[in-house]
Image: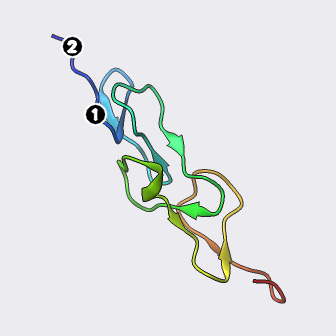
Amino acid sequence: MCNICPVGKYSAGICISCPSGYYNDKTNASVCAPCPIGTFSTEIGIVNISMCNPCPHGTFSNALGVTSFAPCPQGSY
């Protein structure tokens, strides 16, 4: 019997939780999708893009799949 990986996980021969900064909203996926620019996630195994947190006011992230954010440079917001 074959097992299907649930959402929040991906298949690499076995089901593995998506790492922090990534999510998966499909069953039996082979990869997880990165949280978009301007968001971050510290949780593993998140199941949809809405679980990627927006960066707080005065901070930013300018890469995909990040687990933290940085303060805006002085003179910007």
- The residue lying furthest to the top in this view is 1
Look at 58% across and 57% down and name the residue there: 66
Residue 75's spot in the image, x, y percent?
Answer: 84, 89
Q: Which residue is mark 1?
A: 6
Q: Which mark is residue 2?
A: 2
Residue 27 in which image quadrant: top left
Quadrant for the N terminus, please.
top left
The image shows residue 30, relative to residue 20, as above or below, that is above
The image shows residue 35, relative to residue 69, as above or below, that is above
Q: Amino acid at mark 1?
A: Pro
Count of labels in the image: 2
Question: Is 74 or 48 nearer to us in this picture?
Answer: 48
- The residue lying furthest to the front in this view is 50
Question: Which class describes the residues within 10 Å of circle 2: few (<14), some (14-19), or many (20+)?
Answer: few
CA separation in Å, label 1 and label 2: 13 Å
Residue 22's spot in the image, x, y percent?
Answer: 48, 48
Residue 31's spot in the image, x, y percent?
Answer: 48, 31
Residue 5's spot in the image, x, y percent?
Answer: 29, 28
Q: Amino acid at mark 2?
A: Cys
Instruction: Give the image's coloring scheme.
Output: rainbow
The image shows residue 63, relative to residue 28, as above or below, that is below
**Marks 2 and 1: in contact by CB < 8 Å?**
no
Q: Is residue 56 left or right of residue 32?
A: right
The secondary structure type at the circle numbered 1 is loop
- The residue lying furthest to the right in this view is 75
Residue 40 in which image quadrant: bottom right
The secondary structure type at the circle numbered 2 is loop
- The residue lying furthest to the left in this view is 1
Quadrant for the C terminus, please.
bottom right
Look at 58% across and 62% down and name the residue there: 39
Look at 42% across and 58% down and name the residue there: 51
Q: Which mark is residue 56?
A: none
